[in-house]
């Protein structure tokens, strides 16, 4: 319905901000959604800026990596 479409559009916009926004914006949204795992693979490299994706190396820990994908662990429940 209309309500579901609004929620999906908001989440799509939030995902874009997480991947393309600055560190503070991404951290706030990752904590809001209680995100633990972040995937950066070929799809993300095609959709988002390198500067936006580089932030994950600063705000999260690499859990696994193999070209072209990196899996990050984000501690949303830490200060």
Image: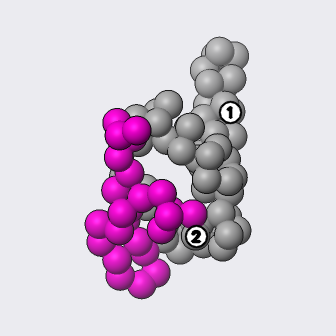
Q: Is residue 33 visible?
A: yes
Which residue is at 36% across, 63% downward?
61
Which residue is at 49% across, 41% downward?
30
**Looking at the image, is 61 positioned above or below residue 65?**
above
Q: Is residue 16 visible?
A: no
Which tag is nearer the camera, tag 1 or tag 2?
Answer: 2
Indicate yes or no whether the magenta region holds residue 17.
Answer: no
Indicate yes or no whether the magenta region holds residue 74.
Answer: yes
**Which residue has dot 2 on it?**
54
Furthest residue in direction front, as rendered: 79
Which of disc 2 and disc 1 is earlier in sequence? 1
**Looking at the image, is 40 positioned above or below residue 75?**
below
The residue stretch that appears in magenta: 55-79
Q: Is residue 5 left or right of residue 63?
A: right
Residue 70 percent location from the top left of the image: 41, 71
Which residue is at 48% across, 57% downward?
59
Residue 66 percent location from the top left of the image: 35, 82
Furthest residue in direction left, as rendered: 63
Furthest residue in direction bottom, as rendered: 67
Q: Are marks 1 and 2 in contact (CB under 8 Å)?
A: no
Q: Secondary structure at mark 2?
A: helix
**Looking at the image, is 21 positioned above or below residue 4?**
below
Q: Secondary structure at mark 1?
A: helix
Q: How many marks?
A: 2
- Look at the image and tell me in which quarter the C terminus lies: top left
Which residue is at 43% across, 74% downward?
69
Q: Residues within 10 Å of mark 2 (few under 14, many from 20)?
A: some
Residue 60 percent location from the top left of the image: 42, 58
**Which residue has dot 1 on it?**
9
């Amino acid at each position: 319905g209309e309500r579901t479409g609004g929620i999906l559009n908001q989440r799509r916009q939030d995902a874009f901000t997480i991947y393309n926004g600055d560190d503070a914006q991404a951290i706030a949204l990752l904590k809001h959604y209680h995100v633990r795992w972040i995937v950066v693979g070929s799809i993300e490299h095609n959709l988002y800026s390198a500067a936006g994706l580089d932030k994950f190396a600063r705000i999260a820990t690499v859990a696994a990596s193999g070209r072209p994908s990196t899996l990050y662990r984000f501690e949303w429940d830490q200060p």
